[in-house]
Amino acid sequence: MKNREHMPLLEIMGINKSFGDLKILKSCSLNVRSRETMVIIGPSGSGKSTLLRCINLLEPADDGNIFFEGNDIARELRRAPEVRREIGMVFQNFELFQHLTAIENIMLAPMKVLGMSRSDAHDVAMDLLKKVRIPERADFFPDELSGGQQQRIAIARALAMKPKLMLYDEPTSALDPEMIREVLDVMAELSSEGMTSIVVTHEMGFAKRAADQIVFMEDGEVIENAPRDSFFGGTVNERATRFLDQILH
Amino acid sequence: MSLDLVFDYVFSPAFFDGALLTLLITVTSLFFGMIAGLVVALLQESRIKPLQMLTLVYLWLFRGTPVLFQIIFIYNVLPTFGVMLSAFASAVIALSLNEGAYMAEIIRSGLQAVKKGQRTAGLALGMTRFSVMRYIVIPQAARIVLPPTGNQMIGMLKTSALVSVVAVEELLLVANQTASANFKYFEALTAAGIYYLALTTIFMSLQYLLERALDRKRPREKRRPVSLMTRLTALTAKTEPR
């Protein structure tokens, strides 16, 4: 049983991705075990977002393997909707559905993908709104909410599908500084409850607080992949150290 | 000039039937035109190259020639290929195909106005491309598409007068025939004008109601400030002795 817990939920083996002549990902490999939180850092253009989009098949990897729960999904583009049901994603610009209220945003996929009844979906959504601490905003439209609130709704929307893995693509980069905290708190809480997560972020505070593993990417390559303590203990690659110095000023 | 005669015409069966036929032509052509437009717009969104080419040829043909030409062409040329159509059917087909070409452009611009990230978010939730279209893109595009569609509806009502060239007894033809019998053009055309204005007014009101119905934020914003009356009745309801 214990052994199973520590089997990687996601195993990425040597994936490459190019857009035209531009090599975005160069033979990237990563393992994420169940209940772990991995934080990916690196300069912009280093391929972090593309890597996330390859995992849930929004971008097909050119080659390599992506094992999710032991099955190679890298070529399973036909089954992409099934794979994506199990993998939640949160975007930099929230991407809440503008024509739906907060609670309807959360209810849509459970109803239309899982075939849940409206009242069941409503209950699920209400619980999640409480979890992200804004039940009172249930009937507001996205453009009536602050960025921090929108992002928390977006997290709830992804959670409504009961995903086994959450992908966060720079979830706080579009937020005003005073709203970053409320989003990171929700994410950290989920991580501490055992939600397996991959987070692309520049928030080193979050990495120190919630990450189990920290990955540093540059030019489409995984340069460093270390447990949190050794990463911040300074026993890391010189390029990663330089990057850390830059973002911490 | 006699206003009495204008009213006689307005309430005469001939004018009424003409107006009814104008309305019928307009509504059926709009119906089929919108379906054609939606299909063509969705085909353009698809990634199937031959279908895209086909839609481009269609748009090129029907936006590049006058409607009047299309009406006459379908009515007079198709029979030589063995396709016999009534004047009414030819008229509706021509107007529908023409409308489809314009609606396709309007719908396409509406679909494109919905940001790509909205689709990505839908896909990331495990929705199929069809569901993303149906539940995320089309509802948002509908709001963008509505005002220009209203213009098209009113435009069609007026364009329908062109089908008089293939002897469909619509409103303008009735008016013209009536007038040429007694040279009372003012009365006959005024009666027709009244009908046109009445019909366009109905269309504009419909557009207004539709725009209001699609604007979902309105009802809730109205709800927030509770009216004096409800506050008063709520108060009495609470203080009522049990």
Image: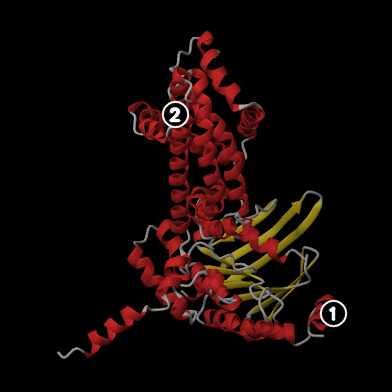
At 33% across and 66% down in the image, what residue appears? A119
Q: Is residue B79 visible?
A: yes
Measured as percent of width and height from the top left, residue A197 is found at 58, 73
Q: Residue at x 62, y 57 (%)?
A: B115
Q: Residue at x 76, y 53 (%)?
A: A18
Foreground: disc 1 or disc 2: 2
**Quadrant containing the C terminus of chain A in the rendered view:** bottom right
Residue on which disc 1 sits: A242
Q: Could you tell me residue B148's position as x and y percent?
A: 57, 47
User: Where B155 falls versus A10 (above or below)?
Assistant: above
The colour style of the image is: secondary structure
Displayed quadrant of residue A12: bottom right
Q: Amino acid at mark 1?
A: Arg
Mark 2 surroundings: few (<14), some (14-19) or many (≥20) residues within 10 A: many
Say left or right for A213 vs B233: right
> What is the number of the mark on residue A197?
none
Nearer the observer, B12 or A248: B12
On what subunit does the disc labeled 1 rest?
A
Secondary element under disc 2, as helix, strand or loop, is helix
Q: Which residue is mark 2?
A: B171
Crowd class of label 1 (few under 14; some 14 to 19; many from 20; radius 10 Å): few
